[in-house]
Amino acid sequence: MALFLSMPMTGAWAQAQTFAFDMPRQPLGQALREYARISGEQIIFTNDLVQGRFAPALHGTFDAHDALTQLLSGSGLVADHAPSGGEMIRQKAQPRAENSAPDATVETVLVTAEKRAEPLKDV
C-alpha cells in the first residue's frame, strides 16, 4: 500500500495543471499566441483562418483545455490534438441536415429489355 501512495498519479487520476489568465477581448490570433505563451502549449493555426475573428475576454484560472475552449467559443473553430503534439485549430464541421440533398448528383438510368424465347442450352 505504501508503494501505491508514493507513486506519482498519471492519466485520469492526475490533477490537471492550471494557469492564470487575464486576457481582454482581442483578435483571435493574438489571443492564441498569448494562450500559448501562458500555457506552454504549441498551437498550430493559419492567419487566414483566424483573421476577422475575436476571442472573448478570459479572466481566471483554467486548465489548458478549458482555456482554449473558452477562447474558441463562438468562433466556428475547434482545436484537435495534433499527431506531432500541440493543438491544431481548424474550422468546425458543419452539421448536415437530415433532409438535405446528398453531395453527389443522382442520375436516373432507364433500362429497357425485350423478352424473347430462347432454348435453355443457348443461354
Image (spheres, rainbow, N blue to C red):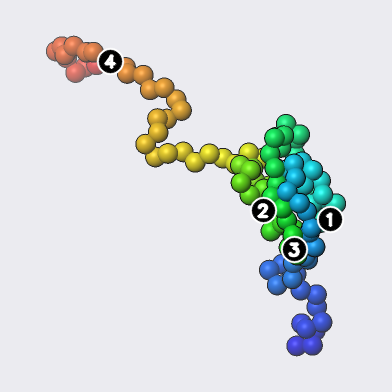
- As displayed, is residue 113 above or below residue 42? above
The C terminus lies in which quarter of the figure? top left
Which quadrant holds residue 12? bottom right
Q: Is residue 101 left or right of residue 120?
A: right
Using a 10 Å C-alpha cutoff, classify the residue at mark 2 as few (fewer than 14 neighbours), some (14 to 19) or many (20 or more).
few
109 or 55, nearer to the observer? 55
Q: Position of residue 57 (x, y in %)?
A: 72, 53
Q: Which residue is mark 3?
A: 60
Q: Amino acid at mark 2?
A: Thr
Q: Position of residue 1 (x, y in %)?
A: 75, 88
Q: Are marks 4 and 2 in contact (CB under 8 Å)?
A: no
Which quadrant holds residue 75? top right
- As displayed, is residue 54 above or below residue 114? below
The circle on residue 69 is 2
Q: Amino acid at mark 4?
A: Leu
Q: Amino acid at mark 1?
A: Ile
Task: Tell us which disc is closer to us: 1 or 4.
Answer: 1
Using a 10 Å C-alpha cutoff, classify the residue at mark 3 as few (fewer than 14 neighbours), some (14 to 19) or many (20 or more).
few
Q: Which residue is mark 4?
A: 110
Task: Tell us which disc is closer to us: 4 or 3.
Answer: 3
Helix, strand or loop status at disc 1: helix
